[in-house]
């Protein structure tokens, strides 16, 4: 039996992100740790998919992602 090593994984810093949909140019604000896929509020294009805790951005989202910090 392989003993599983306990690795401390720091909680990924969650943040609100802002990105533009390349299809319609609408700016969408979404949560980086969203439990669901992120859809464009305007055209419904999937901008990010959930990958178990953190979202993975799709090609439908512009490369320029702004990070909104609420400090
Ligand atoms: Zn869109």
Image: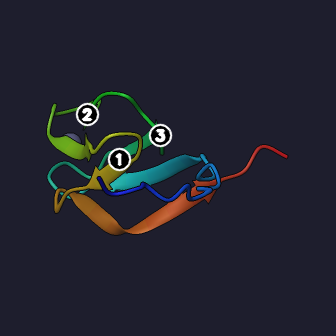
Q: Which residue is mark 2?
A: 37
Colour pattern? rainbow
Q: Nearer the viewer, residue 64 or 31?
A: 31
Label 2: which secondary element? loop
Tell me if 55 is positioned left or right of 39 in this view: right
Mark closest to the chain's N terminus, 1 or 3: 3
Residue toward you, 38 or 5: 5
- Using a 10 Å C-alpha cutoff, classify the residue at mark 2 as few (fewer than 14 neighbours), some (14 to 19) or many (20 or more): some
**Left or right: residue 55 compared with residue 69:** left
Q: Quick one: SS at disc 1?
A: strand
Q: CA distance from mark 1 to mark 3?
A: 6 Å
Q: Is residue 40 above or below residue 57?
A: above
Q: Position of residue 12 (x, y in %)?
A: 58, 52
Q: Which residue is mark 1?
A: 55
Mark 1 vs 2, N-terminal side: 2
Find residue 65 and report its horizontal and vertical position in percent: 45, 63
Disc 3: which residue: 33
Q: CA distance from mark 1 to mark 2?
A: 7 Å
Q: Residue at x 45, y 38 (%)?
A: 30
Numbered mark located on residue 47 in the image: none
Tell me: 13 left or right of 37.
Answer: right
> Which secondary structure, mark 3?
loop
What is the x, y in percent for residue 1? Answer: 29, 52
Residue behind label 3 places its C-beta within 8 angstroms of ligand 1: no
Tags 1 and 3 in contact by the CB under 8 Å rule? yes
Q: Quarter for ligand 1?
A: top left
CB-based contact (under 8 Å), mark 1 and mark 2:
yes
Q: Residue at x 41, y 55 (%)?
A: 3
């Amino acid at each position: 039996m392989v003993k599983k090593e306990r690795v401390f994984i720091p909680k990924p810093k969650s943040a609100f992100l802002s990105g533009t949909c390349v299809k319609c140019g609408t700016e969408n604000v979404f949560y980086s740790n969203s439990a669901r896929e992120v859809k464009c509020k305007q055209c419904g294009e999937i901008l990010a998919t959930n990958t178990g805790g953190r979202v993975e951005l799709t090609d439908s989202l512009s490369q320029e992602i702004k990070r909104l910090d609420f400090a």
